[in-house]
């Protein structure tokens, strides 16, 4: 029995198997916590398998998790967007009180061209049921990358936040440099056409991805990662008082000497239903075999627009780290989780390292 969170350590379900719920999120319903995400149990080096569906777990305490099985299974059809060789990422589920349906969206990166990305939408009457695919969506006509879903507690309006990989007219125009907020239809299965755009004017060579949305009081936050693959990078945030913005860019989130978000990437933020001000940042530590002595300024140098600075990073340690982010070497089946509480100082979200912690203490 687990009695605490231990970030970065191996986490097993009640059957003794490594938990496989990557890039996912949490739901709380009828006194039960549900954790779902990408099942990577078969995603081993050189396997050619990207996913094995979406797996669900249940818990009464957030520490001990029972497997509820695969709720969105992989398809045997090679042409299906859910075939294991297709790049399915970041499932998100929201509940529609009007239709009484659980609505799942997942991102698909085309196997033939990872730059062409779109969404699959699936429905279920209960979260423990097998979800049934109802359609494919191309939000606002864009190649839509990593995303998050949000439901307004008062109005029950729903929104999707995604990074724009490109549009299909100008595919080479600033990829991943825009975060889009789009309003969902009343049944949460499509878009209304209403949207707004945030453009990244940072000096970095790489764009933005992995938006994780949450509300605190009258402020709305978006945690963002940079497009460095499974190599970690420093988490940034945007803040606004409106779903559509305008957004103000804040400082970095993690107090991390390496500036690598404790070697993890945030996938979502969970507001604890039994606590007034406890927000849990859920993150994946994708690569378990990175060198111990990565350069502290690795991200800054690699992504500066100064060509001289960029070239100085090509040393043995950097090359070794980059080489691990290949299908031949990375083992996603053993990726771990880094769950940490968010503290707020004058409205600024900060994440500090804890070797072990309990939500009851907050």
Image (spheres, grey):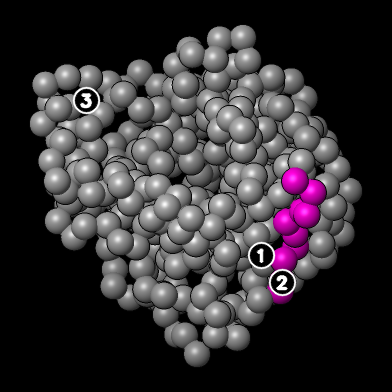
Q: Are marks 3 and 2 in contact (CB under 8 Å)?
A: no
- Binning the other alpha carbons within 10 Å of mark 2 as few (below 14), some (14 to 19) or many (20 upward) gives some
Give coordinates of residue 88: x percent, y percent: 63, 46
Which residue: 73% across, 42% down? Answer: 81
Pointer 3: what residue? 304
* SS for dot 3: loop
Residue 322, image quadrant: top left
* 198 inside magenta stretch: no
Q: Earlier in the sequence, mark 2 or mark 1?
A: 1
Residue 147, image quadrant: top right
- Measure the alpha-carbon separation of dots 1 and 3: 39 Å
From this viewpoint, is residue 148 visible? yes
From this viewpoint, is residue 239 visible? no
Question: Relative to 305, does residue 282 appear above or below in the rendering?
Answer: below
Q: Quadrant of the C terminus?
A: bottom left
Is residue 98 rendered to the left or right of residue 246?
right
Q: Write down the region rendered in magenta.
A: 68-78
- Measure the alpha-carbon separation of dots 3 and 2: 44 Å
Residue 131, image quadrant: bottom right
Give coordinates of residue 8: x percent, y percent: 36, 68
- Binning the other alpha carbons within 10 Å of mark 1 as few (below 14), some (14 to 19) or many (20 upward) gives many
Q: Are marks 1 and 3 in contact (CB under 8 Å)?
A: no
* 74 inside magenta stretch: yes
Q: Nearer the viewer, residue 17 or 194?
A: 17
* SS for dot 1: strand
Which residue: 40% across, 21% down? Answer: 200
Give coordinates of residue 303: x percent, y percent: 25, 29
Pointer 2: what residue? 69
Q: Are marks 2 and 1 in contact (CB under 8 Å)?
A: yes
Pointer 1: what residue? 55
Q: Nearer the viewer, residue 34 or 298?
A: 298
């Amino acid at each position: 029995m687990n009695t605490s969170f231990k970030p970065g350590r191996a986490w097993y379900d009640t059957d003794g198997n490594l938990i496989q719920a990557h890039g996912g999120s949490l739901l709380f319903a009828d006194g039960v916590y549900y954790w779902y995400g990408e099942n990577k149990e078969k995603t081993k080096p050189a396997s050619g398998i990207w996913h094995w569906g979406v797996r669900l777990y249940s818990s009464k305490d957030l520490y001990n998790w029972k497997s509820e099985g695969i709720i969105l299974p992989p398809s045997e059809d090679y042409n299906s967007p859910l075939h294991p060789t297709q790049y399915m990422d970041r499932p998100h589920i929201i509940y529609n009180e009007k239709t009484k349906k659980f609505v799942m969206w997942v991102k698909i990166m085309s196997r033939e061209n990872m730059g062409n990305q779109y969404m699959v939408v699936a429905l279920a009457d209960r979260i423990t049921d097998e979800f049934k695919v109802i359609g494919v969506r191309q939000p606002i006509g864009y190649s839509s990358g990593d995303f998050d879903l949000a439901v307004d507690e008062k109005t029950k309006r729903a929104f999707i936040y995604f990074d724009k990989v490109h549009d299909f007219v100008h595919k080479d125009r600033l990829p991943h440099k825009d975060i889009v907020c789009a309003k969902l239809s009343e049944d949460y299965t499509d878009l209304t056409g209403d949207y707004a755009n945030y453009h990244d004017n940072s000096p970095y060579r790489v764009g933005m991805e992995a938006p994780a949305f949450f509300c605190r009081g009258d402020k709305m936050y978006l945690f963002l990662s940079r497009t460095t693959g499974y190599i970690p990078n420093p988490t940034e945030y945007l803040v606004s008082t409106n779903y559509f913005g305008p957004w103000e860019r804040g400082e970095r989130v993690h107090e991390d000497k390496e500036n690598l978000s404790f070697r993890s990437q945030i996938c979502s933020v969970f507001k604890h239903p039994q606590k007034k001000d406890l927000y849990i940042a859920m993150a994946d530590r994708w690569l378990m075999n990175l060198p111990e002595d990565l350069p502290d300024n690795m991200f800054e140098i690699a992504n500066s627009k100064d060509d001289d600075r960029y070239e100085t990073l090509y040393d043995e340690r950097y090359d070794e780290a980059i080489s691990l982010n290949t299908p031949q070497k990375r083992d996603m089946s053993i990726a771990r989780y880094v769950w940490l509480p968010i503290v707020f100082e004058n409205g600024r979200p900060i994440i500090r390292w804890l070797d072990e912690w309990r939500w009851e203490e907050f």
